[in-house]
Image (tube, grey):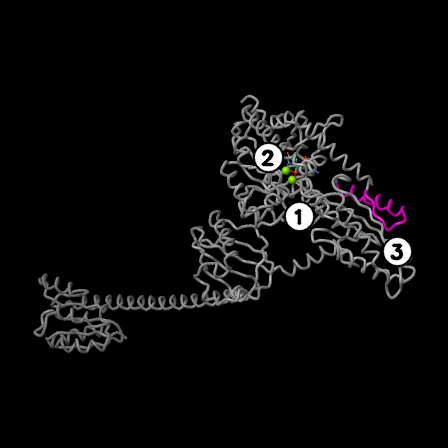
Amino acid sequence: MSQIVIVDDQVTNRNIYTRLAATIEAGVVAKSFADPNEALEWLKHNSPDLVLTDYKMPQMDGAEFIRNLRAIPGAEEVPVVVITVYEDRTFRLRALEAGATDFLNSPVDHHEFVTRARNLLKLHRHQQLLASRATNLERELELAERSRQRLVRDSTERLAQVIDTLPVLISATGPDSRVLFVNAYHTTFAGLDPASVVGQPATRLFGEEHGARSHALDRMVFETGRALPSYEEELLDADSVKHVFLTTKSPLKDPLQKVTGVLTSSLDISDRKKTEAHLHHLAHHDSLTDLPNRTLLREKMRQHIMRARRGDQLFALHLLDLDGFKAVNDLLGHSAGDRFIIEVSRRLRGIIRDSDTLARLGGDEFAILQSNVAATTDAADFAHRILTEVADITTFDGVALRSSASVGIAMHPTDGADAEDLLKNADLAMYRSKAEHGNAFCFFAADMQARARNDALLDAELRLALANEEFILYYQPQIDLMTGRIVGAEALLRWNRRGEGIVSPGVFLPRAEENGMIVPINEWVLREACREARAWQTSGLPPLTVSVNMSPVQFRKRNVPLLVARVLSETGLDPRRLDLELTETIVMQEPEAVASELQQLIELGVKISIDDFGTGYSSFGYVKRFPVSRLKIDQSFVRNVISDMNDAAIVRAIVTLGHSLDLEIIAEGVETSDQLAFLRAEGCDGVQGYYFGRPMPSKDFIARVLEEQPLARTA
Ligand code: C2E
Ligand code: MG
Ligand code: MG
């Protein structure tokens, strides 16, 4: 049903229009007004579908009427037809400006009136329909948006809940190292209120030391835009209980891939570590006495041998076997026999120092690795104590008995270069004691006087060797794993001993370290290696670095930076081509003094490597404090890296932590392609070992480099 409003001061017109309106379509209701003011009043409360108005009216003209009409809310869209005399162009314009929709000429043509009105009505209805559809659509969209927002809010909240309850420390930090986010598990772990942490520097959450380390690692993520490989770390909880975590750091990026933060997540692996440690313990200890077993003893000996090469103190291996233990077993039974063994181990534990190793090799056989032996008499004194201690057991289980042991001693390096030799020779010496009716100790080769004489002879020979130029350097290639090319060589000392041929440093260096000869010898090594490396440089070989092993004695007795500076200027070698290999022992002996010397060396431009890394104190703590550029993973870890999970884990940890401290990692002692593949996969930067070449004379080394770089020949 359509409603039409008619406004005209003439009653005749109103009647005609009303009649005409009724014919427009079925159900049309016409409402007519003589006074436009009344019409306006009515229009405030009604919304007709069409308005017809005369232009000339006494109260107001059509234009003013329309303007008033359009001002009524809801009446903006209603079509308004103005009836004017044909010529009234100015009126029409004014009416249009006021908002008229159409015009009809007066006097009105009936047919035109009906057609125009019908079309306008139709148009108006369409417009209304469209408008209502648009409103509906708008409302639907609004509803959809609201429910989407609710969903997002819900799932974000749920996600936050999940993150809060995960048993993982999760936090995020921004470029300014402030905490962006931290989960509840983390704040509970640290015993902090979340509100006091977010927006604060990360040290609030992590503490000073761990915070600084975390910040350094974050910076790497910001710089590279990439996640760091996971690494293990120890953290204390609010009750100061130590936990081991496997930590991952990855970048948080905005839609433009710019790194805006670093997400740190740490998984508590303390239990796994405990299990691993337990398994490791089982594999390395004797189940009856809980003493180290033969495997662990061998490992300890290897470490000592390494250090002895560096001029640390000598060591002695004591092998002891109880005399007549079979009789104890027979007399008291097996279980008492076991307890007797435990009693012996308890007593032996009481006489060793922390740096010594007491092991049970099986049955009634024990071994003691005595470290820091200055002279053979120290070993003899200690063996005597062992005998006294064992003989002190005079009753057991209420039974009086006589207890004694036979001890065999092998000294390193005189009585054997490796663990197997030492064990074998100590065993031979032990049998000699047994043969002398037990309760005695015996040195391998027994003749201590001859030993001393040998030492004196060696001292004299070494002095002559230096004067007679009997020392030579061999060079072992070092390979960069990125390019697969030789990038340098380690200079290794050899003695071309008269009548004996080439002798390894293991035979004479310990003695040279002891008697101080190492200082002039190593000075010669440094000068010779630099001279040789300078010759490589000038003969057109690609850039090669030479590594020189330094002795702890040198650092104790000489101003090393001064020596290095002098040798560099004498030989003209580019300092960047010289790498000094130091051991952990050197660094540890006087940390403050050594740190300042290393700083001076770095300022000269030479590189510093830590050799045999992992065998000594193997702490990253000190590596951080010294200006070191490279770590050399010790060959004892590389040797079993394929078969021993622990060694593999140690190598992995060294690479990861080393890299996180910006250190280059090189592995030494690589002998097989399997070892190489493992080291490559773990991200080692360089390798050295028999697999690529044994230490060789310089001319062979040059040939090797040329073989690899045929073009260099013409350069
Ligand atoms: P280092 O510095 O750890 O040198 C590596 C040793 O491992 C060398 O023994 C080398 O020949 C050996 N090696 C290299 N690749 C392999 C491999 O694949 N398998 C095995 N089993 N061994 C490998 P070398 O030449 O007998 O030297 C022994 C130690 O003597 C050196 O250990 C170093 O500590 C010391 N040394 C050598 N030359 C000097 C020197 O000029 N001055 C000082 N102070 N010490 C030196
Ligand atoms: Mg070395
Ligand atoms: Mg080494």
The front one of 23 and 180 is: 180
Q: Earlier in the sequence, mark 2 or mark 3?
A: 3
Few, some or many residues within 10 Å of mark 3 (<14, 14–19, 20+):
some
Q: Position of residue 44 (x, y in %)?
A: 20, 76
Q: Position of residue 534 (x, y in %)?
A: 55, 27
- Read off the residue under disc 2: 547
Q: Nearer the viewer, mark 2 or mark 3?
A: 3
Give the residue displayed 80% in from the left and 36% down from the top: 450
Q: Earlier in the sequence, mark 2 or mark 1?
A: 2
Asked whether the beta carbons under mark 2 and mark 3 sit within 8 Å of each other, the answer is no
The front one of 267 and 126 is: 267
Secondary structure state at the residue bearing disc 2: strand
- Read off the residue under disc 3: 325
- State which quadrant residue 38 falls in: bottom left
Secondary structure state at the residue bearing disc 1: helix
- Read off the residue under disc 1: 648
Q: Position of residue 193 (x, y in %)?
A: 48, 68
Give the residue displayed 24% in from the left and 66% down from the top: 119
Secondary structure state at the residue bearing disc 3: helix
Asked whether the beta carbons under mark 2 and mark 1 sit within 8 Å of each other, the answer is no
